[in-house]
Image (tube, helix red, strand yellow):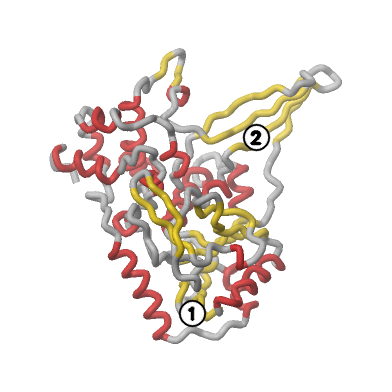
Amino acid sequence: MGTSQRVLASHALDTLLTALREDGYRCVGPQPRDGAIVFDTLGQAADLPWGWQDEQAPGHYRLQHADPSRAFAWANGPQAIKPLTFAPRETLWESRIGADGHLQFAATLPAGEKVAVIGARACDLAALHLQDQHFLQGAHADAYYAARRRNLFIVAVHCTAPAATCFCASTGDGPLCTAGFDLALHETDAGYLVAAGSEAGTSVLASLSLPEASGTQVAQAEAAVAAAGERQTRTLPSRNLRDLLFANLDHPQWDDVAARCLSCGNCTSVCPTCFCHAEHDVPLLDGDQGRHYREWDSCFTEGHSYLAGIVIRSDTRLRYRQWLTHKLGGWHDQYGRSGCTGCGRCITWCPVGIDLTEEVARIHATGGDHD
């Protein structure tokens, strides 16, 4: 694919969207809506969040006006790529009573729509890689996830505007996008520096016939991303907290955080790597048909640990401990790394502002040396 970067003028961003549509993609991109930046079908470049940036803090998210010449001067919104591949609710199969009186089952795989997502961040690319490991690389690949994933084209944007809640530099996942994209953009005063990261991206980039970026332009763009990483103030004490957390299952910090946590599940809903789900059978009113649904669930719900008539994790202390020890500890055994990519969404969208970096720091400070 190479590392050559091309220059796309800001006013010509629609030519990229047009090229993607001509390849059959529905473009999905960030847009300001209801006080947040959300991803939805993108009609034109003018619909991007030009002149908006996000102010984030524990339990706090606000949009405010910024440089009108920038469309990506924000960190992230409540969504990541996850809803585009792991649907929040979908039908897995349908059943009906056949003419012979026996039940018949039919799978309901996604139609295979080609989707191009614009504006993915480095933390979200790392999260998508983890979701690929979970859904595609086990003994039984998930056909529903696979159908959406194989038709996904990713236009990433290197982040130069981290929020106060971001810590992707600490987890090693950003703010520079290094892999997992088809095209990656640097947003600069001169427009966008565009590089390809896949054969599909190379083909789209070639169709745009753009001039090559100068070495000075590339150096300035990369320096802006590096500076964004240096501005992040939140950190985790280590990229591998497995031994520390498993050695402190009775640490008093679990009681402290349980007194504040509402068990609402917001953190798991906005987390780009969480994949807990539940399945339900719903009969239709005609009495002859039914549907089997899969929908996002959370380890913070009582039902998620219901087993053989017993709720295994019966209180908030046990549920928060399960979430954090699995996310930052158990994932190392399952996927070879932490399940946190430092996006900070769980901090921002927690209604009481619980900050997992602070919770871990308190355990690390008093839980012994287990790094």
* Residue to which mark 1 is pinned: 4
Label 2 – label 1 distance at C-alpha = 43 Å
Q: What element carries label 2?
A: strand
Q: Which residue is drawn at 61% across and 43% down?
A: 143
Residue 116 image offset from top left, x and y in percent = 61, 60
**What residue type is disc 1 on?**
Ser
**Dot 2 or dot 1, earlier in sequence:** 1
Question: Residue 230: where, in percent of width, then height?
Answer: 28, 65
Is 116 drawn above or below residue 342 in the view shown? below
| Residue farthest right in this picture | 99
Q: Which residue is found at the position 34% from the left and 50% from the top?
A: 57
Query: Circle 2 sits on which residue?
Result: 92
Can residue 308 be seen in this snapshot? yes
Taking depth in this image into account, of 78 and 110 the one nearest to the observer is 78
Quadrant housing residue 88: top right
User: Residue most toward the top?
Assistant: 309
Give the tally of numbered discs.
2
Q: Which of 289 and 58 is in front in this view?
A: 58
What residue lies at 52% left-to-right and 80% top-to-bottom? Answer: 6
Pinpoint residue 297: horizontal percent, then vertical percent. 50, 32
Q: In this view, does 326 lie to the left or right of 7?
A: left
Does residue 201 sit above or below 166 in this rendering?
below
